[in-house]
Image: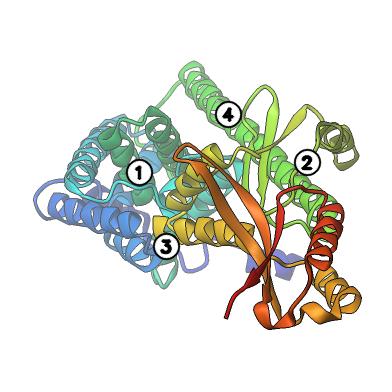
């Protein structure tokens, strides 16, 4: 057991503390080359977010020097070096402002303003981002104190992801979306704070000596301040994580409801939109052909509770004009390549179907009861009474060779009117 515990001893392979502190101090400053590298990394990350390229974003995180002042702040707090803490905070502030300005300028000039999935992923931080920042920061703190730095440093830069939130905040400023800006800045603050705290934890664990003497009362005040900041950072992230969990449950329940109540019955859903973040949750659907009566809609709303969809209202869009607009808006929003031409083609197909006679059973009855009419044609056409008035009429046209008498023609026409439950029926003979 003792041998196993020794295997976890952090002092094994530890670099000289003087060398570690010297390296930390040298990585804090944002002047000259460091500032240029930061600005270039921000542009690369912004392009990656703009075109939704994960590989480009990872590359930007690898070349970014943002970790320096954050780690420096952690070491400063652990060793009570307040001069180093001020320098670290000042340089982090400069780096943050430069990053925001560069990303804001890029997105302001970029012709592509649509929020991609990589951008949206940085607007809603939660407790999982806290865990990533803290444990990523622990790895970074351990790696910095080693003689052999190895692979952890690049991995920490990718895992803690400081660049994307800053670029997303710049995007929020460029398009005037405060929700995006505040969410991204909160994520960036979480990352900075918990990387700093995890570095402080490693410094305390390795028992780095204090640079300045601090009395017990001041040390207690510093600890209390850090604790308050921890609570301020953690409480919103727990709430956001809970909201995310509830939203995912809602989405899964909606999917089950649609599958059981519609897809399993052969109804084709062509439009779906859900609203979770509202006082009354909503599900909006539209179908290819099925139209629902008021009683059916009431029954569907009553059954929402069976799927744990309480405080949820089901709306089925059956207005074709408004629905068409919403479908086109949703298609554009999801970046799917469906054009107005496709909608027009579908509408033409629907109009053509109105003129096509598809009752095969009736055609079989005609050929059985009136075999002398074959060959014949049957279909629907517009009959115009005047320029402002017309109606659809079913026309059965018989070849003139059949020589049907007037009585047979009248009997066939009367029979068709009864079968079709319409007076708009005509039987005519085509002269050859």
Give the total of numbered labels: 4
Question: CB under 8 Å between callouts 2 and 1?
Answer: no
Can you tell which mark lies on residue 292? 2
Residue 236 is marked as: 4
Distance of mark 3 from mark 4, alpha carbons?
38 Å
Task: Tell me: 280 left or right of 307.
Answer: left
Sooner in the amino-acid sequence: mark 4 or mark 2: 4
Specify which label sits upstream in the sequence, 2 or 1. Answer: 1
In front: label 2 or label 1: 2
Q: Secondary structure at mark 1?
A: helix
Residue 278 lies in what quarter of the image? Answer: top right
- Mark 2: few/some/many CA within 10 Å (<14, 14-19, 20+): some
Quarter of the C terminus within the rendering:
bottom right
Name which residue lies at 81% across and 31% down: 294
Closest to the observer: 348 or 86? 348
Residue 347 x, y percent position in the rendering: 52, 55
Observer able to see residue 320: yes
Q: Position of residue 423 (x, y in %)?
A: 76, 47
**Which-is-in-front pick, marks 1 and 3?**
3
Task: Tell me whether circle 3 and circle 4 mark residues in contact (CB < 8 Å).
Answer: no
Mark 3–mark 2 Cα distance, whole angstroms, equals 30 Å
């Amino acid at each position: 057991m003792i041998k196993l515990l020794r295997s976890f001893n952090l002092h094994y392979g530890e670099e000289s503390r003087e060398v570690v502190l010297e390296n930390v101090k040298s990585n804090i400053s944002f002047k000259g080359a460091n500032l240029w590298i930061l600005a270039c990394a921000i542009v690369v990350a912004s392009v990656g977010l703009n075109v939704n390229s994960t590989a480009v974003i990872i590359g930007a995180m690898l070349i970014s020097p943002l970790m320096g002042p954050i780690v420096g702040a952690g070491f400063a707090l652990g060793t009570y070096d307040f001069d180093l803490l001020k320098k670290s905070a000042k340089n982090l502030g400069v780096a943050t402002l430069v990053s925001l300005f560069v990303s804001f300028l890029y997105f302001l000039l970029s012709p592509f303003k649509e929020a991609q999935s990589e951008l949206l992923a940085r607007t809603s931080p939660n407790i999982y981002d806290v865990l990533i920042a803290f444990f990523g920061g622990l790895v970074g703190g351990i790696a910095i104190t080693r003689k052999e730095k190895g692979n952890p440093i690049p991995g920490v830069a990718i895992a803690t992801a400081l660049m994307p939130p800053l670029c997303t905040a710049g995007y929020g400023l460029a398009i005037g979306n405060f929700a995006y800006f505040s969410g991204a800045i909160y994520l960036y603050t979480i990352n900075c704070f918990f990387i700093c705290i995890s570095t402080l934890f490693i410094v305390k664990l390795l028992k780095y000596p204090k640079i300045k003497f601090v009395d017990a009362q001041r040390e207690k005040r510093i600890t209390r301040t850090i604790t308050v900041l921890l609570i301020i950072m953690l409480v919103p992230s727990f709430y956001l994580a809970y909201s995310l969990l509830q939203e995912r449950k809602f989405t899964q329940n909606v999917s089950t409801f649609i599958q059981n109540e519609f897809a399993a019955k052969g109804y084709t859903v062509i439009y779906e939109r859900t609203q979770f973040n509202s006082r009354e949750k909503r599900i909006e659907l539209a179908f290819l052909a099925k139209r629902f009566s008021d009683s059916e809609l009431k029954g569907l709303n009553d059954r929402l509770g069976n799927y744990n969809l309480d405080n949820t209202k089901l709306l089925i869009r059956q207005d074709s004009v408004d629905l068409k607009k919403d479908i086109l808006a949703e298609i554009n929003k999801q970046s799917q390549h469906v054009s107005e031409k496709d909608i027009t083609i579908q509408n033409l197909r629907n109009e053509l179907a109105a003129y096509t006679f598809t009752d095969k059973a009736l055609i079989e009855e005609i050929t059985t009861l009136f075999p002398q009419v074959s060959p014949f044609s049957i279909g629907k056409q517009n009959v115009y009474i005047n320029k402002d008035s017309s109606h659809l009429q079913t026309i059965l046209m018989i070849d003139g060779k059949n020589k049907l008498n007037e009585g047979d023609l009248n009997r066939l026409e009367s029979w068709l009117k009864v079968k079709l439950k319409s007076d708009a029926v005509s039987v005519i003979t085509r002269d050859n």
